Image (cartoon, rainbow, N blue to C red):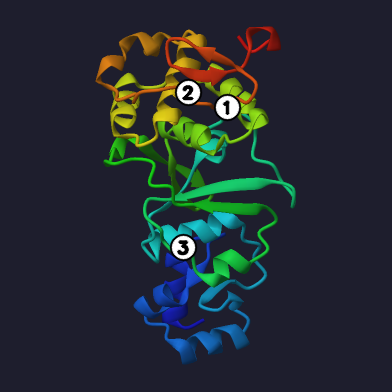
Amino acid sequence: MSSKLNQLLKKWPKGAVATARWLQKNGVYRQLARQYVSSGWMEPLGHGAFVRDGEKVDWLGGLYALQTQLGLRVHVAASSALSLKGLGHFLPLGESGEVFLFGERPNKLPAWFVRHPWGVRVSYHAPKLFSLSVPASFTTVEQGAFQVRISAPERAMLEVLHLATTNAAMDHAIELMTGLNTLRPRVVQSLLEGCRSVKVKRLFLWAAEEANHAWFGRLAVGRVDLGSGKRQAYRGGRLDAKYQITVPRKDDGHV
């Protein structure tokens, strides 16, 4: 094995995608990359992306490359982030499963990532949900030999509510909120003050108060812009007088 290849494999985490850009940065240009493929050291995943030969790489290994090699501001979001932190339901497997990625600005994901059959449906959104940066609202999780950036639970819950456009999704969001009894009030406060969606903020506060979380009492709700007028969130629900938003009826067993 050549010294260059040996150095490359030491830098290349197992289970991760290597992009052509990253390979070139490490001295492996197109012709040498082709030699490595023909020699059986790596195989193409798609145009501009490679994996170690014979290695199975999942969507997290692809996301690692997006974040660290291509510098895209894309993160695991919403219920997927909660699952990776051991909160809520486990990530679903198989083609019926769906994982959520959010971009902080409308990044276009490379074709190799979008087209590859990861075994789950990857749903990518760039909603511009927040008007300011809250560094503490992100965290990382280890996936074998590498880490990926994900939403911390405080941010993830707001993302869940942003995606909840059906009653079933709203029911799931309320269920997730009941388990979030260790959220950090300061982070929640910063996110609520920077959130652009009045509906999401009202739902978050209503669900947190209904769950009777101790951290809710430490929020300065008066500093959060909740807009004016009524909002419909739950179809066929009741209007909550405090937050002026429709929520599940009490006889539905939710509250």
Identity of the amino acid at label 1? Ala
Residue count near mark 1 (Cα–Cα under 10 Å), binned few <14, some 14–19, many ≥20: many
Mark 1 residue element: helix
Q: Nearer the viewer, mark 2 or mark 3?
A: 2
In-front residue for pair 198/40: 198
Q: Residue 112: x and y, percent?
A: 56, 71
- Viewed as shown, does residue 38 lie left or right of 141? right
Residue 81 visible in the snapshot: yes
Callouts 3 and 1 close, C-beta under 8 Å: no
Residue at 61% across, 77% down: 43
Mark 3 residue element: helix
Disc nearer the start of the sequence (1/2): 1
Which residue carries the number 1 mark? 173
Mark 2 residue element: helix
Q: Residue 30: x and y, percent?
A: 46, 88
- Viewed as shown, does residue 75 lie left or right of 60? left
Identity of the amino acid at label 3? Ala
Identity of the amino acid at label 2? Leu
Residue at 47% across, 57% down: 64
- The relative height of residue 220 versus residue 65 in the rendered view (above or below) is above
Residue count near mark 2 (Cα–Cα under 10 Å), binned few <14, some 14–19, many ≥20: many
